Amino acid sequence: MNRWLIPVLLLALLIVALASLLAGTVWLYPREVLSALGDSRPSLAQLIVTEIRLPRVVLAILVGGILGLSGAVLQGLLRNPLAEPGLLGVSAGASLGAVIAIYYGFSASFVLASPLFALIGGAVTAGAALLLARGGGTLALILAGSAISSIAYAGVYLALNLAANPYASFEILTWLMGSLAERSWDHVRLAGPFIVLGGAMLLLTAPALEALALGEQQAESLGIHVGRVRILALLGTALGVGAATAVAGSIGFVGLVAPHLVRAAVGHRPAKVLVPAALVGAILVVVADTATRVIPAGGQPIGLGVFISLVGAPFFLWLVLRIRTRAA
């Protein structure tokens, strides 16, 4: 493993985070940002930085980090380079929970209703996938997650189809496109603890991932309890990704792309991919969120999830073609 990889990624994350604090409808100079961060006296720059952009940057780091980390863990656990958090139905369940809150008007009366319902939805779908796949191994877990994801998204589309209020439909579509706009410290306090706890649980799977690279039977012979590792990974993904989806909406491809960008640099070792993948995921989301604020789109902001999908889809196709070429 390149010993400079993590320090370089941390430096890159710091640079893009600071750049994100500068960019927006009102552009700020670096000295204004530094002054706003170190001075408690009220001013326009201080308000913009500390109450609008800083919580948005913090959420982008948390969301990107947990998506990259969970993608790395799931790819190592399932030994599938195309695995990502949405495979287990957590993102779909969280989306359905938020849509229910919007559809029935709970979000109109309580600003954090959508994130709270999304957390519950992600937890329910993760639990259902775990129960359905119990004792069935990795393939059963993938199939259960895919089935539950399909059911959850069917519920989302049904809500869109039956929504009598066009404003509710617009709000649902806006949420599904993903965004960190208008997020506050309340959202950080709501999602942050779940993301940190989920991330800690995922990091605990690192030693087992090294053994699982040899296969489940070999890992069991080395004293690894594969069933417990699978539960730990699923619970960590449910907590972390469920919370991330709760505050940012549906964001794909980060969990798929981030591990592949660093895997060669760490010698393709599953345990060594985790932290770099989390840092790369954080960098990707911070950069994408900044881009959605500065790229002109006719006065209509580009959804964060939409922008990442536009960038991530070509990489996904390249990855599929690469795997097909290797298998030939």
Image (tube, grey):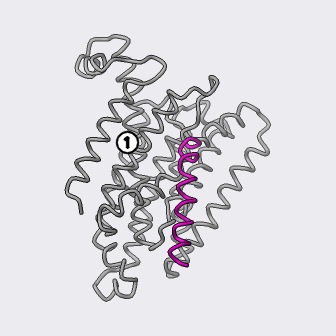
The number of numbered badges drawn on the structure is 1
| Residue 308, placed above or below residue 295 | below
Residue linked to disc 1: 61
Q: Which residues are magenta?
A: 305-328
Q: Residues within 10 Å of mark 1 (few under 14, many from 20)?
A: many
Side (left or right) of 44 relative to 251: left
Predominant secondary structure in magenta? helix
Q: Amino acid at mark 1?
A: Ile
Q: Nearer the viewer, residue 99 or 9?
A: 9
Q: Secondary structure at mark 1?
A: helix
**Residue 280 point in image, percent of width and height:** 37, 50
Quarter of the C terminus within the rendering: bottom right
Picture layout, residue 311 above or below residue 205: above
- In the rendered image, residue 274, in percent from the top left (x then y), is placed at 33, 60
The image quarter containing residue 209 is: bottom left
Location of residue 6 in the rendering, given as x and y in whole percent from the top left corner: 25, 52
For the point 62% across and 64% down, the residue is 148
In the image, residue 249 sits, relative to residue 297, either above or below, namely: below
Within the image, what quadrant is residue 213 found in? Answer: bottom left
Instruction: Residue 71: say if magenta.
Output: no
- Which residue does the image show at 42% across and 18% down from the upper left? 27
Above or below residue 46? Residue 235 is: below
Q: Is residue 175 left or right of residue 3?
A: right
Towards the viewer: 215 or 228: 215
Residue beneath the point at 34% across and 53% down? 197
307 drawn magenta: yes
> In the orientation shown, which residue stands out farthest toward the left?
3
Provide residue 137's location: percent of width, then percent of height. 49, 80
The quarter of the image holding the N terminus is bottom left
| Residue sitting nearer the eye, 297 or 85 | 297
Give the residue at x 34% y 63%.
Answer: 264
